[in-house]
Amino acid sequence: RFNETLRGSVEGQPVIFRATIVLPSHGGAPELTGHLDVAPLGARVFLADGRIEAEGEEIVYRGRIRSHGAWEDFRLTKTLDGGAADAWHRARHARLEVGRRIDTDIAMGVADVATLMASIEPVGAHGAVDRAAAVAHFAAQGLRELFGAAR
């Protein structure tokens, strides 16, 4: 399990997406929960029906949010094409789309990446050494391999 925070702006207002991702230890689909803080949608809105899909070179977070009494589709896309040289750069940037109202780029800053790495809670790890090994594996493998293995 790990936490992600991505930030950007919409109509000059800050937008923050916070998510918790749980990768199953034995098959099954990854789990996604989270919320979006953005003024045009009415402050904090929570993600419903969250799921993660690997589509070729893309990792797509999908779900729905309820804003102003109506449901809207949520999509956050990370494009992970290319080699390992800039994989962390690509994994930190995403395209956020909410219905027809929001279509913007968001990204993790340095502090957000540090928080993500500190949030990793590997299933079955015992003690600091096991946890450090799991964090190192996550950093080395990146998101594509982790989500691809969970499919």
Image (cartoon, grey):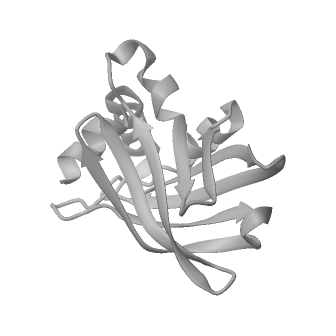
Q: Quick check: 13 left or right of 138?
A: right
**Residue 59, percent from left and from top:** 35, 44
Q: Point out the residue furthest to the front here.
A: 100
Quarter of the figure that contains the C terminus: bottom left
Compared to residue 20, the image places residue 54 above or below, namely above
Q: What residue sits 29% from the left and 43% below the top?
A: 146
Q: Residue 23: which quarter of the image?
A: bottom left
**Residue 5, percent from left and from top:** 62, 49
Quarter of the figure that contains the N terminus: bottom left
**Residue 25, percent from left and from top:** 23, 59
Q: Quick check: 79 left or right of 146?
A: right
Q: What residue sits 33% from the left and 25% below the top?
A: 81
Q: Point out the residue furthest to the bottom here.
A: 69
Foreground residue, 126 or 91?
A: 91
Q: What residue sits 44% from the left and 45% below the top?
A: 77
Compared to residue 74, the image places residue 121 above or below, namely above
Q: Quick check: 110 left or right of 133?
A: right
